[in-house]
Image (cartoon, helix red, strand yellow):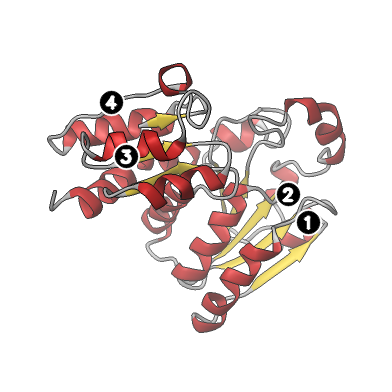
Amino acid sequence: MIFQKPSLRTRVSFDVGMQHLGGSALYLGPSEIGLGKRESISDVTRVLNGMVHGIMARVFGHEDVLEIARWASVPVINGLSDERHPCQAMADVMAIREHFGRTQGLKLAYIGDGNNVASSLLLMCAHFGLDFAIAAPAGYTLPQKVKDAAAPIVQRNLTTFSEVTAPEEAAQGADILYTDTWISMGQEEEAAERIATFAGYQVNAELLALANPGAVTMHDLPAYRGKEITDEMMDGPQSIVFQQAHNRLHAQKAILARLLGGA
């Protein structure tokens, strides 16, 4: 497990998941290998190829995990990069299916920054038959290449994708209100600007009231309570935030079993 970023859910879920499956996991933090600095990514990967059955990487740059995959002869899992967070999306769709008993025909409204989490959620929704709407300020919406990748899947599965600037518009008819922190790791210098820009993009009781009856709130964590989401929406009866967090373990076990089960 290669970590450039600190982690709670990713580290614990992969480590405990491997133990549940009868294997073991090794944590390699920034001080151990200095990925791409102390040693090149290609050299690190080729060393690991001969010692482990799989590599999970939680990195800053998406190109880093792609570079690992180029040199790897073992399965590589993107534990998070600045462009995608696929493991989180798998836990999320599991929580949605558990709660609603289905995914087809539901609408997920994402409120906030069009970041790596939002990108993976768009692709997840397209694959599993959910309509996806994102409300983001100008300049913070989804990258065009993500929308291009999702477009044929959306068309094939007869779902919808919409981008708006008003959270109230995205929340109309939604079954799920989803948000993420406004300030991700590596964006600390932009904190003041981002807090001002996203001030009206909070998931709260007023926004939930615009969604469908029985709608739920979701957050991939860590959350900055009182900013992107209120305590009421985190802890209230319509929250499945901690269910989706717990599902990181089960989703990670499924990924590991699928990729390493024949090792």
Which residue, given by chain and number where applicable, does mark 4 sit on?
Answer: 26
Residues marked 1 and 2 touching at CB (< 8 Å): yes
Place of residue 165 in the rendered image (x, y in percent of width and height, measured from the top left): 82, 57
- C-alpha distance separating marks 2 and 4: 43 Å
Q: Amino acid at mark 2?
A: Leu
- C-alpha distance separating marks 3 and 2: 50 Å
Q: Is residue 241 visible?
A: yes
- Mark 4 or mark 3: name the one nearer the start of the chain: 4
Q: Amino acid at mark 4?
A: Leu
Which residue, given by chain and number where applicable, does mark 1 sit on?
Answer: 168
- C-alpha distance separating marks 1 and 2: 6 Å
Pick the quarter of the image with the N terminus. Answer: top left
Residues marked 4 and 3 touching at CB (< 8 Å): no
Disc 4 or disc 3, which is closer to the eye?
3
The numbered dot on residue 250 is: none
SS of the residue under disc 1: helix
Crowd tier of the residue under label 3, counting other residues whose Cα lies within 10 Å: few below 14, some 14–19, many 20 or above: some
Disc 1 or disc 4, which is closer to the eye?
4
Residues marked 3 and 2 touching at CB (< 8 Å): no
Q: Which residue is farthest top?
A: 31
Q: Amino acid at mark 3?
A: Arg
The numbered dot on residue 46 is: 3
Which residue, given by chain and number where applicable, does mark 2 sit on?
Answer: 207
Place of residue 129 in the rendered image (x, y in percent of width and height, measured from the top left): 48, 72
- Mark 1 or mark 2: name the one nearer the start of the chain: 1
- Mark 3 or mark 1: name the one nearer the start of the chain: 3
- Mark 3 or mark 2: name the one nearer the start of the chain: 3
